[in-house]
Image (cartoon, rainbow, N blue to C red):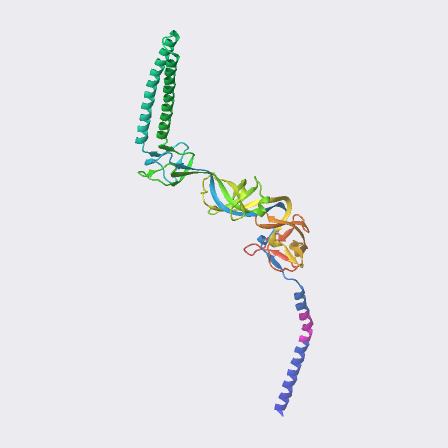
């Protein structure tokens, strides 16, 4: 009897507890569902780094033509043998600096010195013959005037005088040639610069026009680049060029100074010469360079990076920050180009100066999402 009563009491307690728990769950159910729905409707916060955003403002946009080529010196010259002979001294080596007129090579002078002496002796002999012919002509002129000799005899003396005078002139010219050949055994630098090549050693015998040395002036350099014939109409003298040379930390400024009037055989391209200043002498002949030729320029236009512009069904738009939220702004674009920081595009409609836009393609973003700008360390600015 006692066990049966204890069973019914336990069952009643369990039923009462189950009823109370059900009532509590029924009361909390609608509130919890509403909280979940509210959380689903509330948009998440989108965080950006300051480097992800940019402020649109008027700037300069340039259209560029890429070019490649190698550098060469504007002023360069070769020292060649002017006479044949044996090289006695080479006074410079590769890399040395020389001045215009500085002696760089000396050749054996013995043969040419002997020729000078021979020519000088011939000149003295010719002058002696001229003195004799002059006296004979003058004497015959006096005898002719007195009627002691015939006109024919005087004419013979006159002819001998003329021949002697011509021999003197010939001997003088031969001496000048011999002296010039002797002077040519000493070779001088034609320009100021640096020796880039030495092709001869002391003791070697060389012929006329043998190439002995090369001298280059690194003060002014040129980039020789090929332009397709179809694009040559976009190039003109004086256009600005930015040249990036391998090994140089930053781009160098240059300009187009010459355009070849003929195409290159087999390539149908035209050579363009871009002058690049080299005041520090860091550039070298033969270095490879990549150039950006400015073919068109627009100033005072609104510019955004090319990556900031999105396209959807043929319509273009950017993401901007307005009132702390992300906004999708339809835009009309103009010409593409370069703004100095990379590929950019002109915005003709849809944005005002000062607008803050997402400058990189971060995928599909959701308009209306609250925006939070964080620093690189993760902390947001106090103003935000």
Q: Position of residue 174 (x, y in %)?
A: 36, 26
Evaluate whether residue 324 shows in this view: no
- State the image quarter where residue 96 is shown: top left
Residue 162 sits above or below residue 321 on the image: above
Residue 127 sits above or below residue 333 on the image: above
Q: Nearer the viewer, residue 189 or 205?
A: 205
**Residue 365 as seen in the image, left or right of residue 187:** right
Residue 168 sits above or below residue 207 on the image: above
Q: Position of residue 345 (x, y in %)?
A: 62, 50
- Which part of the image, by quadrant, shows the N terminus? bottom right
Identify the residue shown where x is 32% and y is 23%.
Answer: 122
How many tags in the picture? 0
Is 328 magenta? The answer is no
The secondary structure making up most of the magenta span is helix
Q: Nearer the viewer, residue 303 or 260?
A: 260
**Residue 109 as seen in the image, left or right of residue 225:** left
Magenta stretch, residue numbers = 25-33
Q: Position of residue 338 (x, y in %)?
A: 59, 48
- State the image quarter where residue 242 is shown: top right
Evaluate whether residue 275 shows in this view: yes
Identify the residue shown where x is 57% and y is 45%.
Answer: 232
Is 26 magenta? The answer is yes
Work out which residue is located at the far top of the displayed protein and give it: 146
Identify the residue shown where x is 68% and y is 73%.
Answer: 29
Q: Position of residue 146 (x, y in %)?
A: 38, 7
């Amino acid at each position: 009897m006692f066990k049966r009563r204890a069973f019914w009491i336990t069952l009643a307690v369990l039923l009462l507890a189950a009823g109370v728990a059900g009532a509590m769950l029924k009361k909390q159910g609608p509130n919890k569902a509403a909280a979940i729905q509210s959380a689903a409707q509330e948009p998440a916060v989108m965080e950006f780094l300051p480097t992800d955003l940019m402020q649109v403002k008027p700037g300069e946009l340039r259209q560029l033509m890429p070019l490649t080529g190698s550098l060469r010196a504007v002023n360069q010259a070769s020292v060649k043998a002017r006479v044949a002979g044996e090289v006695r001294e080479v006074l410079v080596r590769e890399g040395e600096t020389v001045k215009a007129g500085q002696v760089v090579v000396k050749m054996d002078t013995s043969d040419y010195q002997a020729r000078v002496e021979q020519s000088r002796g011939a000149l003295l002999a010719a002058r002696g013959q001229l003195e004799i012919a002059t006296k004979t002509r003058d004497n015959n002129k006096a005898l002719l005037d007195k009627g002691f000799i015939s006109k024919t005899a005087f004419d013979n003396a006159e002819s001998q005088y003329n021949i002697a005078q011509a021999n003197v002139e010939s001997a003088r010219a031969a001496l000048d040639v011999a002296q010039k050949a002797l002077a040519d055994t000493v070779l001088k630098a034609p320009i100021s610069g640096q020796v880039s090549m030495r092709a001869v050693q002391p003791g070697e015998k060389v012929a006329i026009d043998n190439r002995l040395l090369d001298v280059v002036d690194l003060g002014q350099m040129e980039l020789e680049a090929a332009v397709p014939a179809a694009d040559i109409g976009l190039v003109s003298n004086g256009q600005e060029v930015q040249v990036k040379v391998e090994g140089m930390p930053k781009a160098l400024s240059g300009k187009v100074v010459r355009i070849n009037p003929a195409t290159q055989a087999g390539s149908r391209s035209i050579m363009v010469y871009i002058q690049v200043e080299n005041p520090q002498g860091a550039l070298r002949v033969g270095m490879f360079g990549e150039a950006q030729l400015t073919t068109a320029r627009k100033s005072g236009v609104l510019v955004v990076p090319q990556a900031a512009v999105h396209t959807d069904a043929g319509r273009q738009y950017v993401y901007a920050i307005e009132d702390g939220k992300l906004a999708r702004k339809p835009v009309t674009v103009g010409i593409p180009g370069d703004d100095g920081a990379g590929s950019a595009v002109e915005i003709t409609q849809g944005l005002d100066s000062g607008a803050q836009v997402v400058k990189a393609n971060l995928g599909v973003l959701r308009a209306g999402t609250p925006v939070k700008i964080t620093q690189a360390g993760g902390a947001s600015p106090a103003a935000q």
